[in-house]
Image (cartoon, grey):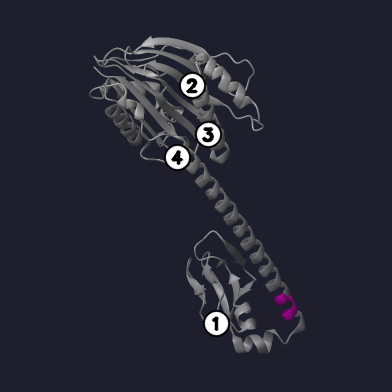
């Protein structure tokens, strides 16, 4: 009998009454109907159907033609009469069958181990997402304190969950604290490190430290018990909503974007400074500025500028600046909506490898 590629020789669950010997070509035994890549190749000189005949049970796995093949079909009656009655032939057949079963068991065991690792990985991702969601704020009560304050924050977690963070809250009647950051690494370790960082920033902010002192203290604390050598890039600051005055400290993070009431867009000129959480006595950069009425500052993580199109080209800082410029108005909601929409179009909704996080702060007119 000659069969074409992909022809079904034996179907799982059916009753088989013949031995199929491959004279020419090749078959494949599919071990898992849901996984076409999990199979055992059967080459010329080998046979299939022997197990169901020997065990007098339904076929345990589907068998299909790998390529055009020629098969010798030996009915069950002839199998018992002419094959199993010859000791050497029977012994060789049983050896081949035993080897195939061992190979099948090894492949199935490897698949189960992969599935267990995948389930463990998915559990870790779930834990990381829960940590991230429980730490980052979704509402900002401080907005009620200052009529001219407008704020919008948004984060889209990556498939593997990074360590992006942000926070924003009132310190007193005159001052507001804010921070945005990005932890190195992925998954649960990065999420736990991020949670530590957020807690430390909240603690530091409630003292009378300057942003530079806050960053130095947080960095020193993160450096302790950091066997994995994780680090964080971050910008933290104190903002005075009534006057628009602001002081920032930068630990290796991307410079914020400013859009004024006339629609001009520029980046804040500041040095990136050292990474936080690695070096003792690390030096960070600081800058003071004043938001003019109608001006908006947008902070972001590298998940924005490093978003990739299908060819691997980065979204980039120029594209971000151009998108902010063409956004109608300066409202934080509109600005973030336009940037995230532009980024989604650019990446064609491809799965990204990093969290995408932005915080926009406006001094309304």
Q: What kind of element bears circle 1?
A: loop
Which residue is more in the foreground, 342 or 290? 290
Residue highlighted by disc 4: 133
Instruction: Answer whether residue 145 is magenta in the image.
Output: no
**Which mark is first along the chain, 2 or 4?**
4
Q: Residues within 10 Å of mark 4 (few under 14, many from 20)?
A: some
Residue highlighted by disc 2: 205
Query: CA separation, marks 1 and 2?
Result: 75 Å
| C-beta proximity under 8 Å, tags 1 and 2 | no
3 vs 2, front mark:
2
Give the image location of residue 350, x and y in percent: 40, 40
1 vs 3, front mark:
3
**Which mark is first along the chain, 1 or 4?**
1
Give the image location of residue 164, x and y in percent: 48, 32
Q: What kind of element bears circle 3?
A: helix
Secondary structure mainly formed by the magenta segment? helix
**Which mark is first along the chain, 2 or 3?**
3
Toward which corner of the image does residue 16 lie, by quadrant? bottom right
Q: Residues within 10 Å of mark 3 (few under 14, many from 20)?
A: many
| C-beta proximity under 8 Å, tags 3 and 2 | no
**Which mark is first along the chain, 2 or 1?**
1
* First to last magenta residue range: 89-94
Residue highlighted by disc 3: 195
Identified at 32% across, 35% down, the residue is 345
């Amino acid at each position: 009998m000659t069969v074409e590629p992909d022809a079904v020789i034996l179907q799982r669950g059916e009753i088989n009454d013949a031995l199929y010997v491959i004279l020419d070509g090749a078959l494949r035994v599919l071990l898992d109907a849901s996984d076409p890549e999990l199979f055992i190749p059967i080459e010329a000189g080998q046979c299939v159907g022997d197990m169901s005949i020997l065990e007098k049970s339904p076929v345990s796995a589907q068998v299909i033609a790998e390529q055009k093949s020629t098969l010798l079909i030996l009915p069950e009656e002839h199998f018992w009469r002419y094959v199993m009655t010859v000791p050497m032939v029977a012994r060789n057949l049983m050896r081949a069958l035993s080897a195939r079963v061992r190979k099948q068991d090894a492949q199935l065991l490897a698949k189960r181990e992969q599935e267990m690792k995948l389930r463990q990985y998915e559990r870790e991702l779930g834990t990381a997402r829960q940590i991230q969601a429980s730490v980052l704020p979704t509402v900002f009560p401080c907005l009620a304190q200052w009529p001219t304050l407008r704020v919008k924050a948004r984060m889209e977690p990556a498939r593997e969950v990074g360590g992006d963070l942000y926070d924003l809250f009132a310190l007193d009647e005159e001052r507001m604290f804010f921070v945005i950051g990005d932890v190195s690494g992925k998954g649960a370790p990065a999420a736990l490190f991020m949670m530590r960082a957020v807690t430390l920033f909240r603690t530091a902010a409630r003292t009378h430290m300057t942003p530079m002192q806050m960053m130095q203290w947080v960095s020193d604390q993160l450096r302790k018990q950091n066997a994995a050598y994780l680090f964080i890039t971050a910008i933290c600051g104190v903002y005075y909503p009534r006057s628009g005055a602001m002081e920032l400290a930068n630990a290796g993070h991307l410079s914020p974007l400013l859009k004024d009431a006339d629609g001009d867009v520029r980046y804040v000129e500041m040095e990136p400074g050292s990474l936080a959480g690695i070096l003792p006595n690390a030096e960070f950069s600081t800058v003071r500025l004043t938001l003019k009425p109608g001006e908006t500052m947008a902070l972001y993580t590298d998940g924005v500028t490093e978003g990739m199109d299908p060819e691997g080209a980065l979204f980039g800082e120029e594209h971000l600046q151009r998108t902010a410029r063409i956004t109608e108005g300066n409202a934080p909601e509109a600005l973030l909506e336009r940037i995230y929409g532009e980024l989604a179009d650019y990446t064609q909704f491809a799965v990204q490898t990093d969290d995408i996080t932005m915080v926009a702060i406006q001094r309304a007119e």
